[in-house]
Amino acid sequence: MNIVKRWKVAAAAVTFTGLPSLAMAAEANLQSDDFVGISFWLISMALVASTVFFFIERDRVDSKWKTSLTVSGLVTLVAAVHYFYMRDVWVATGETPTVYRYIDWLITVPLLMVEFFLILSAITAVPARVFWRLLIGTTLMLVFGYLGEAGYMDVTAGFVLGTAAWLYVLYEIFRGEAGQLNAENASPAVQSAFSLMRYIVTFGWAIYPIGYLMGYMMGSVDADTLNIIYNLADVLNKIAFGLIIWHVAVTESEGKAKKK
């Protein structure tokens, strides 16, 4: 893809992510003291910029890494669209956009987990069961969280089941087959990236169950604070996560080129 085509793709992504905001712009304006709304706006712009970056950088890496960067770009694109909607819901109503946030997570979080499978696939043969374990584990984590948070099941049961699914995912990437494949086959650069991604899933994703516990089970955190924390967490869990993959893809591709 030449530079003109790449910029056309990037421009289309930017235009698409802006449409939701235009649809509701006449109903309410962002106020200078609405820090939750401002956080939605800032992060939505950062997600758009990240999308453009990941899609353009695809041409910089070897073919085996392109899918990983494509998925990173799709994660930030999907998140950006939802952030525009969530910002507008918040600005117009002052209500927490729970449904939009979970729709975003139901798409982007499994994709983020699939990235572990993709970077391993770039260096060795990976059984399909690894893909399905990671995908199903993250999906169950989100489904139980939503059912509990939205009132379709007991709040405590949703928390326990969602947390159990998250712990299963952590086991798989640390001690399970995915972790073993990384330790046995990955280069130092890939192992470093894999390790950083695991820590994001451990500590970055921990923000969500802690927010669920503090906000919905204990009632000790207000909606404003919870939304700002969730928004800032997505900078780490989506943008930084993608940048780690971009870095290892570029490092591996440029290292291969130097050896030729």
Image (cartoon, rainbow, N blue to C red):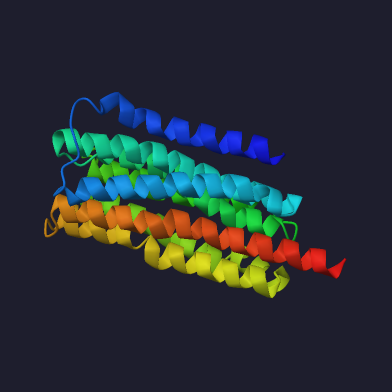
**x, y (%) of residue 148?**
25, 45
Q: Is residue 69 above or below residue 17?
A: below
Q: Is residue 158 left or right of residue 35?
A: right
Image-based side of 123 in relation to 166, left or right: right
Q: Nearer the viewer, residue 69 or 106?
A: 69
Q: Looking at the image, which residue is at 45% across and 44% down?
A: 48
Hey, which quadrant is residue 150 in on the image?
A: top left
Q: How many numbered marks appear?
A: 0
Residue 244 picture location, percent across and down: 55, 63
* x 19%, y 51%: residue: 35
Residue 26 on image: x %, y %: 22, 25
Asked whether the viewer can see residue 254, the reply is yes
- Residue 251, by quadrant, is bottom right
Q: Nearer the viewer, residue 257 or 234?
A: 257
Report the residue that reaches farthest toward the front: 4
Q: Name the residue at the right extreme.
A: 260
